[in-house]
Structure formats: C-alpha cells, structure tokens
Amino acid sequence: MNLSTNRQACSRDIGKLYAKHQILKKCASSQLQCLAKNAKLLKFMYQDNVREQSEKEIYQPGSLRLGQYKKGHLQKFDVGSCLNTSAIENDMKSVARSSKCNYFKGCISKQHELVRMGQAITYKDGEGQDCFGEFDGAVKLLNPSSETSHVNWIQVKQYACHEDENGQVQSGRFDSPLLKKTDNIVIIKSSEVCHKVNIVHNCINGHCKFEDAHHTFVEEREGVVRDALIYKHDFANNTYLLNRFYLGNDFEAVLQTF
C-alpha cells in the first residue's frame, strides 16, 4: 500500500488508484463481451458454426464455392474441359460435353463444411452406398436440358477399402482403417457429399524417408542457406490411413461405411 500513496493522504490516493482500476476493468469487460460474440471466436472455442443457421444459399449443403472469376464475373467453360470424359458419359448421360458451365473448386458438405480441391470426403453413390473419395472439382450447368433436373455436379477420385483375403477391412496404426487410391473417377450430385475426412499416407509399407536439403531464408536483408531435413513421401503404394481422430464423434457414423 505504501507504493500507492505519498503518505500525506493515504486513503484518498489509494481510493483514486483503485477507482481507475475499476473503470478500466469495466471497460475491458464490455469489450470482452463484444469479442465473445464474434462468430469466428465462437466457432474456434465451441465449434459453434453460426452459419449453419443461415438461410443464404451459399451456406446450404450442396452449394458450390470458390468459383473461377475473371474481372468480377464467373467464367464459362465447356463441361468436357472441366470433367473427365468417360465419367461424363457414364454419370451424366443427358449432358453434352459442349454444354456450358461454371467451374468451382469447393463445395459445402451435409455437415456444413467447406470442402476444397484435393480433400478427402465420404459421399453417397448412385445406389445410396457410402464411399470414400477425393474432391476433384465441380461444375454448375448454365442451361440444363429438360432431362437434367440437377445442375450442381462434383467429380470424385475414388478410394477403396483395403481388404485382406477374407474380405475384412485392414487397419493400420491406431486402429485406423486402410484406404487404397484407385484410378476410378465418378461424377456425383453435390448434395451427396456427406463428410470431409482426413487421410494420411501409410509410410510403413512405402519407402518414405528423410532427405538432406537446403533451406534459404532472409536474415539481416541477406539470403542465408542452412541445411535441413525434409521428409519425402513415396506414394507408389497408394495406401492411406483414415485419420479417425480428425472425425471425433462423427467417426462412428463414418465407421458404418465399413
């Protein structure tokens, strides 16, 4: 207390000092209350996605995002230049390859997640079966024919469950199911994307290793080169682990796929 007063009017000095602290505390608390209502903070702290309640079309499952723009306008492409030709013939029989479309690099899943190019997903195929795949772009048909009732389509590179001789799905480290990347490409409706999942390369059966490399960075306005170790994957085995910990409570729902 002696540090808070000149010992001439102790009560007054101490009272003024702590009154300022209370004012600052009140101002700070009101600012913190406003900050706590921020949508990004709510999603980070409590996984509360306030956009799930939005009625805007761009936040609804199946909507396409991350379009290709030029001078503020969505670019137009031929469907045949955006999607695999064989997949178009098999899964979009009523759509001509010369049909015009907009191209997108993202979509919204049924769980209101933004799925980007190259990310793994679970989806429903034409027979309603749960499958794994890699998101590989999407198109929105501009002038669909009367035979085509759906306008948003997604291209998927398929993954297959790694099975043993008895048909049982094999598991890797941490009891994570093994998936094998295939050459099959399918086109599905954007509304059939269920979950965004995380997969990691199965390095045990591959030849992945650390390699010496040179890392260049700027220090004191000069480029400095230092030795570093970089881990390089050998993707020849095409085998991946489904990261069950990324899914959290949704893993049980995805597990039904097996």
Image (tube, rainbow, N blue to C red):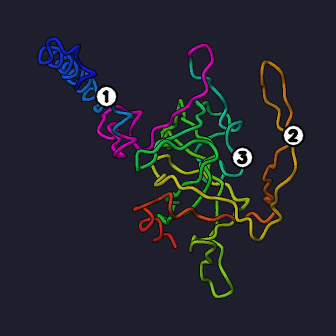
Q: Give the residue displayed 47% in from the left and 52% down from the top.
A: 192
In the displayed image of the protein, which residue is found farthest to the bottom? 166
Say whether disc 2 or disc 1 marks the residue closer to the N-terminus. Answer: 1
Q: Quote the CA–CA distance across marks 3 and 2.
A: 42 Å
Circle 2: element type: strand
Magenta stretch, residue numbers: 43-72
Q: Give the residue displayed 57% in from the left and 45% down from the top.
A: 154
Residue 217, position as x, y percentages in the image: 79, 30
Snapshot quadrant of residue 27: top left
Compared to 132, does 175 lie above or below? below
Instruction: Decide which of 16, 22 is in the foreground and name it.
Output: 16
Q: Give the residue displayed 58% in from the left and 30% down from the top.
A: 102
Residue 90, position as x, y percentages in the image: 64, 54
Instruction: Decide which of 72, 199 is in the foreground and name it.
Output: 199
- As drawn, the label of residue 35 is 1
Residue 198, position as x, y percentages in the image: 57, 55
Q: Which residue is mark 3?
A: 85
Amino acid identity at mark 3? Thr
Compared to 201, does 148 lie above or below? above
Amino acid identity at mark 1? Leu
**Label 2 packing within 10 angstroms: few (<14), some (14-19), many (20+):** few
